[in-house]
Image (cartoon, helix red, strand yellow):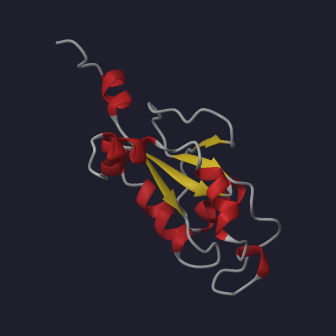
Amino acid sequence: MAGSDGNSEAKRRPLIGITIGDPAGIGPEVSLKAVGDDDLLSICTPVLIGDAQYLADWARIFDLCREFIIVNPGEHIPRDASFPVIYNLKNINGPVEMGMEQSACGRPPRLHRIGCRPLPVASDRCHGDGADQ
């Protein structure tokens, strides 16, 4: 049957962007646990949006070590990834203490949206069928 190989299946999986929320809050732990679910990986390619080094450090702390594909702004996000993708905003400078308000976590949201520009796939699909008219 045409298109029944695993590679074709992987290319049909949608990219799903997942922001980590406040880096000092529960968002990093929740998002790391979510992308570690094999059922999720079978239906989509999850893309964590945040600082790759920060997320990798917390993945080790939470004992959620796994492989990630790290993509920097301007690079292509692979649709056929076998592992979760981290869209690396490189926006955490210095240590962040969980549960504590701190300036490292308080950048204005407009700076974070710049990194999301390469992820228009879901938006294009929603608006392409005329549903927004």
Give the side of residue 40 with respect to residue 60, left or right.
left
Residue 63 image point, x, y percent: 55, 63
From the viewer's perspective, tell me whether residue 20 is left or right of residue 39.
right
- The front one of 9 and 130 is 130
Residue drawn at x 56%, y 70% is: 21
- Closest to the observer, 82 or 109: 109
Residue at 56% over, 44% down? 67
Most extreme residue toward the right is 94
Q: In the picture, which quadrant includes the N terminus?
A: top left
Task: Locate residue 89 relative to residue 82 in the image: left or right.
Answer: right
In the image, taking residue 18 as reference, residue 50 lies left or right, namely right
Determine which quarter of the picture holds residue 111: bottom right
Residue 33 lies, in percent from the top left, at 45, 63
Q: Residue at x 28, y 19 (%)?
A: 5
**Up/down of 67 relative to 82, above or below:** below
| Res 55 → quadrant | bottom right
* Foreground residue among 108 and 45: 108
Residue at the outermost bottom position: 100
Classify 26 as above or below 126: below
The percent position of residue 74, horizontal first and vertical second, equals 68, 37
Q: Which residue corresponds to the image point at 30% horizontal and 43% vertical from the top-left?
A: 43
Q: Residue furthest front?
A: 133
- The spot of residue 79 in percent (x, y) is 45, 33
For the image, the number of numbered tags is 0
